[in-house]
Image (tube, helix red, strand yellow):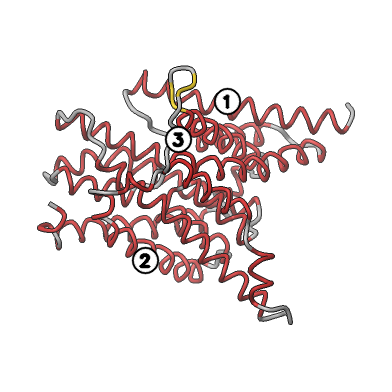
Amino acid sequence: MNANYKKYAAVALCLFIGFLATESLALQNQLLGRTVIGGPMVALLVSMTICNLLRTIDSDVKAGTTFVSKRFLNWGIILTGATLSFGDILGTGVKALPLVLFNIGLAFAMALLAGRKLQVTENTAVLVGGGTCICGGTAIGTLSRIIKASEEEIAFAMAAIFLFDTLAAFSYPYLADVLNLTENQFAFLGGAAINDTSSVAGAQATYGALKGLNDWNGALNVKLVRTTMLIFVALAWTVIMASRKDAHAAASRLSVIRKTFPMFILGFVVMAGLNTIGAFQFTVGGASAGKWLGKLANFLFASALAGVGFKIKFKDVFSRGIKPIALGGITWGCVAASSVLFIYLFAGYVG
């Protein structure tokens, strides 16, 4: 087969997996009544499974999957901005900002510290920390482009995030019921300590069903604050990477930052700004343009992670990858404990 055909076939396969993974959300809701695993996570699992069923993967096929994992990731990040309206973070979301900020610092500190003890790469530790404290796969995808993480490091971090994100999405609504948490307390716990947005939505729906709440979005409002923090975390790591380069080069700091700064972050900010002023409120096919762009972003993320999945073998995840998974558990546990402690120590403030 012609090399270009193999490459295009690989791209088409990633797109097909991304489409099926995105559509799996509707099937999960139909069968289980909620979303259990986000589309990008499903795509990663599917492509990893295919990769492990095949003895070898042709280099031209790898070129196609690499193209998808890098390019589609950037486009997905930009379009994600169309789903954010900074006005929506008022109320419970803003109230949770102190907890969100503390968890960001805690997650990165613990990930980097424990990562050194476990002897995982710094990039892996950064990705696990960012995925835990911000928004799972989206944060991992964004930070991976800034710190230039390898496909293997991305896949290991995603595996760690997936495992504990799924556990949290399943258990937190029932834990909140056992602990008799108020609506605001669960909003703080679910919104601040569950990684993926779809998992927060699923946990919120479960909690709402248990409590008989209709159209309640407290946890998602808190999650929106965390997602917005991705902008500032990305900027911080851009400056950190630029500073490191500056230490080894004669170029000015401004020049280094300009060369290092990922342009897709600017696209993300612009799209969020446009959405804030209502640029995507017009209706297309019965839904707002912003909603369609959000769906397209999820599809692009799922397709990109399908490409990532073709770079990793299961045996690597459970041999060399067991340390990143342990790191994910440590970081996740610290953020969860911090959130519960905050809820009880500041019960009057949380409400």
Q: Label 2 amino acid?
A: Leu
Q: Is residue 297 left or right of residue 29?
A: right
Residue ID for mark 3: 38
Number of marks: 3
**Which of the marked residues, 3 or 2, is nearer the chain's N terminus?**
3
- Name the residue located 63 percent from the left edge and 69 percent from the top edge: 257
Residue 136 placed where, x, y %?
Answer: 45, 48
Q: Quadrant of residue 150?
A: bottom right
Q: Is residue 42 left or right of residue 152?
A: left
Q: Label 3 amino acid?
A: Gly
Which of the two residues, 122 or 295, is positioned nearer the viewer here?
295
The answer for how far apart the CA atoms under marks 3 and 1 are is: 12 Å
The answer for how far apart the CA atoms under marks 2 and 1 are is: 35 Å
Disc 1 residue crowd, few under 14, some 14–19, many 20+, Cα 10 Å: some
Which of the two residues, 233 or 162, is positioned nearer the viewer here?
233
Residue 249 placed where, x, y %?
Answer: 73, 79
Residue 12 placed where, x, y %?
Answer: 71, 27
- Name the residue located 15 percent from the left edge and 61 percent from the top edge: 346
- Name the residue located 32 percent from the left edge and 48 percent from the top edge: 89
**Which of the marked residues, 3 or 1, is nearer the chain's N terminus?**
1
Q: Is residue 55 left or right of residue 6?
A: left
Disc 3 residue crowd, few under 14, some 14–19, many 20+, Cα 10 Å: many
Residue 113 placed where, x, y %?
Answer: 45, 71
Q: Are marks 3 and 2 in contact (CB under 8 Å)?
A: no
Q: Label 1 amino acid?
A: Phe
The disc at residue 19 is: 1
The disc at residue 311 is: none
- Name the residue located 16 percent from the left edge and 54 percent from the top edge: 350
**Which of the marked residues, 2 or 1, is nearer the chain's N terminus?**
1
Q: Quadrant of the N terminus?
A: top right
The disc at residue 106 is: 2
Look at the picture and state if 131 lies above or below 203: below
